[in-house]
Image: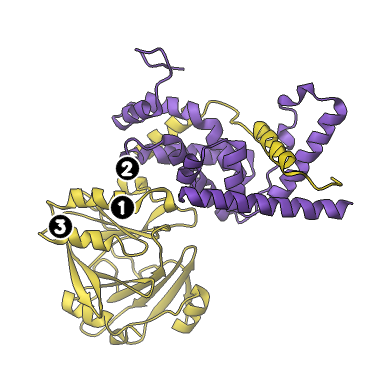
Chain colours: A yellow, B purple
Amino acid sequence: MSERMEERELERTLSDIGERLDRPSRDMWPAVRARIADRQARPWWSRLNLSGSTFAPVAATLAVILVAAFLFTPGVADALGHLLSLPGVQIYQVPQTPTARPNASPPTFAGQRVATAAEASRIAGFAVRTPAALGQPSAIYVETAPVRVTIVYASVKGIPVSPQAGVSAIVVEFKGTIETQIMAKAIGPGTTLDAVPLGTGVAYYLAGQPHQFFFKDPQGLLQPETLRLAGNTLLWEEDGYTYRLEAQVSREEAVRIASTLR
Amino acid sequence: MRTDSVEGRPAEDAVLVERAQHGDTEAYGELVLRYQALATRTAYVITGLSTEAEDAAQDGFTKAYFALGRFRTGAPFRPWLLRIVANEAKNRRKAAGRRPTVDLSVAEDRPSGDTALSPEEAALASERRTFVLGALSKLREEDRLVIAYRYFMQLSEAEMADALGVARGTVKSRLSRAIARLREITAGEASVHV
């Protein structure tokens, strides 16, 4: 082209391109029907669908509250509503959680193992913080798609080794937004949820029956985390980052540990 | 195409969606048939590959089926579906880690409104398409998508807003900026060729 295109000509060319754009080579319905049947045959957690900003989180929130309201203690539905506003977190009430895998020995965690929190911060692109109350981490893992840091404490005095995780405590940190749901949780009817004060904000404590965590893989698909169930868990948000502490401790102790995040 | 038994007209999207929500998969099949071309084009603009676009569209339809329970009654189905398909296509492109190259070479033989053009005019139109496509592939994804929704798929402003997940006012400004950027690129390319 040797001349500047006039606006009308540009628009006409764009419409012309549109007419010629690729069309499906065949009727898609048989293939779509087969995919639907395939997904229906899979376990329920692989059917959870949280693709980016596709769905309004509010709609999912309401659905969960409706299901959960009569299963939880009074006030918990309200707590759920708040919890669902935590960046990157969704909770689903399910009739039962998957069967836990026997303890992995040693437990396995996803991501690149790094030596220090500073190195994890450099890779993750945000300041990784650790709770002083737990002492030195045994291991730190960093995932980059999406970014997530897992800090493992193999043995902490006064905290039993979790039958689910195979370690005393795990801290997970990530930056999530409502548009990019990084983590989902599924909780069964035996799990309790409490909103508790933490600093100037609120944290959420899940306890009772083990529950399942899910994380988005780089393809945006939800995957159950390491096929293990989580024990008592505290979830909270600070400065746009979401933190999760998993340890077999009381609600008060979990809050105390969380308050020592440095 | 199946029709509304009373009026003899194609069933409205809302009717098909409601049927699908109640387990009528064939009603959903009709929606797939109705929007498969639009869905594939949307995915194609993002992925730049025909095979991947079809795959993304099929996955988008599948995800939309399982999300029907969350579909807001009375909302337009078409932009809601396109939003899901576009997200699916974006995820695939990100996973592949490459930039799309919208290539119409395979579509050049397809019949279009060019039949009345002289060979010289048809050749010039073809050159313009190639030129504009080259410029399009240099745009950001969000600019390319807003142009595609407007010019390739003729979506209304309200549908574009729904499909892009933005306010209607934002659609206007975004489209205007995208066209301006496209013009800048085409102007720059033209000057190189002078």
Identify which residue, A137 or A26, lies in the foreground: A26
**Above-or-below relation of B22 to B59:** above
What's the amino acid at mark 1? Val
Residue A10 figure quarter: top right
Q: Along the polypeptide, which appears first: circle 1 or circle 3?
A: 1
Q: Which residue is mark 1?
A: A58
Kindly identify the residue that appears in the image at 38 percent across and 24 percent down.
Answer: B26
Mark 1 on the same chain as mark 3: yes
Q: Which mark, by number, is residue B70?
A: 2
Q: Which mark, by number, is residue B192?
A: none
Residue sitting at the far right: B194
Q: From where the camera sits, is residue A221 visible?
A: no
Q: Chain of mark 1?
A: A
What's the amino acid at mark 2? Arg
Mark 3 on the same chain as mark 2: no
Q: Which quadrant, please, contains the N terminus of chain A?
A: top right
Q: Distance between the Cα atoms at labels 1 and 2?
A: 10 Å
What is the secondary structure assignment of the residue under circle 1?
A: helix
